[in-house]
Image (cartoon, rainbow, N blue to C red):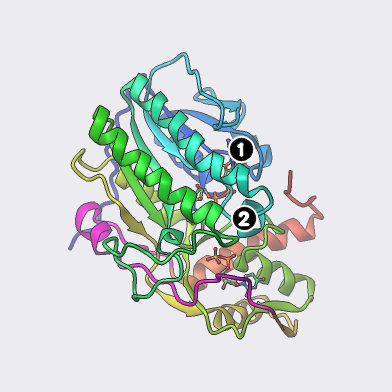
Amino acid sequence: MTFQTRINAPRSGSAVLIAGGAGFIGSHLCDALLQRGHRVICVDNLFTGTTDNIRPLLNHPNFHFIEHDVREPLEIDEDVNRIYSLACPASPRHYQKDPIGTMKTCVIGTLNILELARQKGARVLQASTSEVYGDPEIHPQPESYLGNVNPIGPRACYDEGKRAAETLMFDYHRMYGVEIKIARIFNTYGPRMLENDGRVVSNFIVQALRGEPITIYGRGTQTRSFCFVEDLVRGLQLLMESPASVTGPCNLGNPHEVTIEAIAREVLSYTHSDSPLRFEALPKDDPKRRKPVIETAERSLGWRPRVPLKDGLQATIAYFALRIATDAPALVP
Ligand code: NAD
Ligand code: UDP
């Protein structure tokens, strides 16, 4: 199999809109699209994103930032032919802070994005999630698996919100012919994660660098499969520019599955830290195992991750080490 590196996106006068472009994944996507010569409109309400992530872009002639909440309708004057719909807090700590707001972002926000896509004749890619599989009963998870989500638990605002967003995408596609792409993103990590957003990779790295205890929830035997952000951003662009018939859902993630305790030990080794492990209570509805089947992405996009966990962790450690060494203020809005 050959793996594509070329992404044939149109470079006409039309812009690419990235909702959630000031966030972790969105800001890397802004960088990548600008580097390839696109005009980029970044829309974000800065709930979990920050202008620090896009500060170097603010004076770029092809970059335009609009502070806006997608729960309100969007009016954009210029032509837009691609919309990446990433606006939504992704960390459990943040999406559970305002669960009703999270559900509204997923449902009303996606509706507003789809209305914009319909009005502009733009193609839209929705950042969905492996959380649509809930605590999966089959392993690994192919796109055909319909999931095992607790609809009334503390994670439901996000999981069910993202499921509803997928439904809206397909209904706009069937009813109005909007061109859609659904990416089911698995755990992604890398530079520009927030140091205190509660996700495991950023938590462990910051704890190890500061010599604080590494907080393992449960026994640490639960698994995740971690994808480096650079691989993910390449996958999102390939999916966006794939033939119109490829709607997804398409899993994007790294099939290399590791236990949470193993991640802790790798982080300790690469940071040369002697932080102790501290075992804490497992949060409710925490999925036990997660690993993507990526045959759809391999077959239809020629995509698979390239960055090994060791290299990705070391790049992420270097990012946080620099922030800590320069005493940069925590990137929490
Ligand atoms: P993030 O929290 O860093 O980025 C989300 C961005 O959306 C932030 O900049 C935030 O300010 C913005 N936002 C939130 N609500 C908004 C609203 N109502 N209006 C406008 N902007 C809003 O998270 P991320 O990790 O970059 O995730 C990006 C997308 O990818 C999200 O949709 C998330 O659900 C999805 N995703 C991420 C992961 C992951 O591991 N990072 C996994 C699966 C899915
Ligand atoms: N986790 C942990 N310690 C932490 C943060 C998270 O053990 O400090 C665990 C968490 O319980 C889950 C896994 O790591 O089993 C991944 O958590 P994260 O919030 O990063 O992602 P998600 O649960 O949404 O996949």
Quadrant in which residue 126 is drawn: top left
The quarter in which the N terminus is drawn is bottom left
Highlighted magenta segment, given as a residue range? 281-307
Q: Which residue is mark 1?
A: 54
Q: Nearer the viewer, mark 2 or mark 1?
A: 2
Which of the two residues, 151 or 118, is positioned nearer the viewer here?
A: 151
Q: Is residue 75 left or right of residue 305?
A: right
Give whichever of 278, 145 is nearer the camera. Answer: 145
Based on the displayed image, in which of its 4 quarters is residue 201 positioned?
bottom right
Q: Residue furthest top?
A: 77
Amino acid residing under circle 1: Ile
Residue 278 place in picture, x, y as percent = 73, 83
Outermost residue, front side: 152
Residue 21 x/y as whole percent: 54, 38
- Which residue is depicted at the point 28% across and 40% down? 241
Left-right relation of 10 to 32: left
